[in-house]
Image (spheres, rainbow, N blue to C red):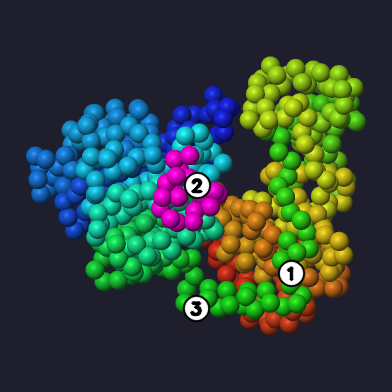
Amino acid sequence: MPPTDAMPQQPATESVPRRRLLGSYYTPDELAALLVRWALADGDGPVLDPSYGGCAFLEAAAQVLSKSDPSNAGARVYGVDIDPSCIETARDSDLLKEGNCIEADFLAASSDDLPGSPYAAIVGNPPYVRHHWIMGDQQESARAAAAASSVPLPATASLWAYFLLHSLRFLAAGGRLAMLVPEAVLQTDYAVPLREMLAKRFGISRLIHIRDRQFEHTDEAVVALACSGFGESGTIETMSVDSVEGLRSVLLSSNGRPPQCSPFPPIAGDTLGNAIALLRRVGKSPEVKRLGEVASIRVGVVTGANRHFIRSRDALDALDIPADVQQGIVSRTRWLKGLEFTDYDHETLLGIGAAALLVRPESAEHDRLVDPWIQEGEEGGINERYKCALRSDWFRVDLPPLPDAFATCARAGSPLLVLNRGEYLNSNALHSVRWKPDPAVTPEAMAVGFLTSAVSAWAELRGRRYGGGVLKIEPGTLKRIPVPLIPGAEAVFKKLDSLLREGREEEARKIADKRVLGEGLGLGDPEIELLKHVRTNLMEWRRPSRGADGNG
């Protein structure tokens, strides 16, 4: 059962399409057939798909096995899925046996529950559900599966990771695993123990990133896991291909890495390794501090329903909402035009009708003044939404201290640190930054240091690539970003702010690099160009292309 970008929390699931609730975005037939062909290359089954969904993997397995035993291929193909509607697809197939398709929570299943176990091959596409959307009984079964595996999987792991771990309980010695998992397997901290586990339990593990987006209705990138020799300790390889055809050349080639395959991330030669070594050296400089050393970082205001709580000036005037219950707020990354956000910037946004005011009554007297707004929310069911329902007064948002600066959370370009020049909050589309006492340099110098290629290259390597090619920086990652803090760098702050507002971001970064990395840290032009090259290539590479047209 393939990816969903997110899963909604209870109880506000009524308006969410069922396909997103269950992760029902099915694998293209061509891709499923390729993985199954590789997984069954050494034997005749049995084979299991632990989240069979649209049956693409099951039918591909039956077709492969029918070549050796046409009359009985489906008897060696098994599937599990928590969605009861999936059995209808299996029932309509001429190749599959309905009795081999089990309706159950796979994470709660034991060997006694699954006929055919252990399996010579396990294939499929587990649900890509993020940790905060794993709910109820499945949350309990997921944690139990992790505990039984003895792999230290943190609570931040997404659902696919638990499926991967639990699958190994049903794999026969010498068996093969062929799964599609999200790019997170190559990026996130929680995936580190998973990769270590694969190296310890398989003779050869290949993690093959596919650049072309494979699923309709989502830009989630995928990685094909191709692991063989279960029960042996061996090697793990990471690589990248552009398309399914490139994956075919890797899986079915007998000559090592074919020409269609490139390193992951795909930067030629020693360039990436040299850049990483340079970043490590830069990080040891006394002028470089992790952002978390000089600032506290937290997510922005969580309203639970931004469209209700964050309004335009005209919308609030229409409801006669008084000014003393309105708080200016920055809720869009694109509103950050320069290195500082000013009163003029906010007033300009209000002038063009932007929703840049947070409604926040502070007392019973205020509550009476905003009664039409409260009634509007209750009539629309806002009070029943998850975050709202947790509050004693659903309409009274918890307000954090005003931030000293905003840091971008998800951006198509490199991340930015923008100084807050007014009394503005920020929504959870941005990160809130507050300086710790006695910072080493001025806030302006921090913003300039954050603009350098050292920071952006580090962020490209450590951040996560999300749908549409944006770079997502989580709060924990933001805390670890090494920022060069050079006294006097504030001298170019106004110049860089102006260039950014004019859309000349690359020119601004070039000046920041010269002032901070060159003059401040003593890096030579070739070293600065190396960081810029890696940053530019990784940024371009994360932009999605779409090559699949199957519907699974």
Question: Would residue 128 be seen by someone viewing this image from the given angle?
Answer: no
Can residue 153 be found in the magenta stretch?
yes
Picture coordinates of residue 87, whole percent (x, y): 29, 29
Q: Is residue 109 above or below residue 252?
A: above
Nearest to viewer (mark 3 / mark 1) = 1
Q: Which mark is residue 158?
A: 2
Foreground pick, 122 / 111:
111
Element under disc 1: strand
Can residue 446 be found in the magenta stretch?
no
Pointer 3 with pointer 2, Cβ within 8 A: no
Picture coordinates of residue 117, whole percent (x, y): 24, 45
Q: Is residue 120 left or right of residue 328?
A: left
Element under disc 3: loop
Foreground pick, 341 / 372:
372
Mark 1 is on which residue type?
A: Lys
* Crowd tier of the residue under label 3, counting other residues whose Cα lies within 10 Å: few below 14, some 14–19, many 20 or above: few
Residue at position x 73%, y 61% in the image: 292
Q: Is residue 511 left or right of residue 168?
A: right
Element under disc 2: loop
Pointer 3 with pointer 1, Cβ within 8 A: no
Please give the range of residues in magenta. Answer: 140-159
Question: Would residue 290 be seen by someone viewing this image from the given angle?
Answer: yes
Mark 3 is on which residue type?
A: Asp
Mark 2 is on which residue type?
A: Ser
Q: Which mark is residue 270?
A: 3
Q: Quadrant of the N terminus?
A: top left
Q: Is residue 530 left or right of residue 139?
A: right
Q: Quadrant of the C terminus?
A: top left
Q: Is residue 473 above or below residue 552?
A: below
Residue at position x 23%, y 52% in the image: 120
Residue position for label 1: 289
Residue at position x 38%, y 39% in the image: 108
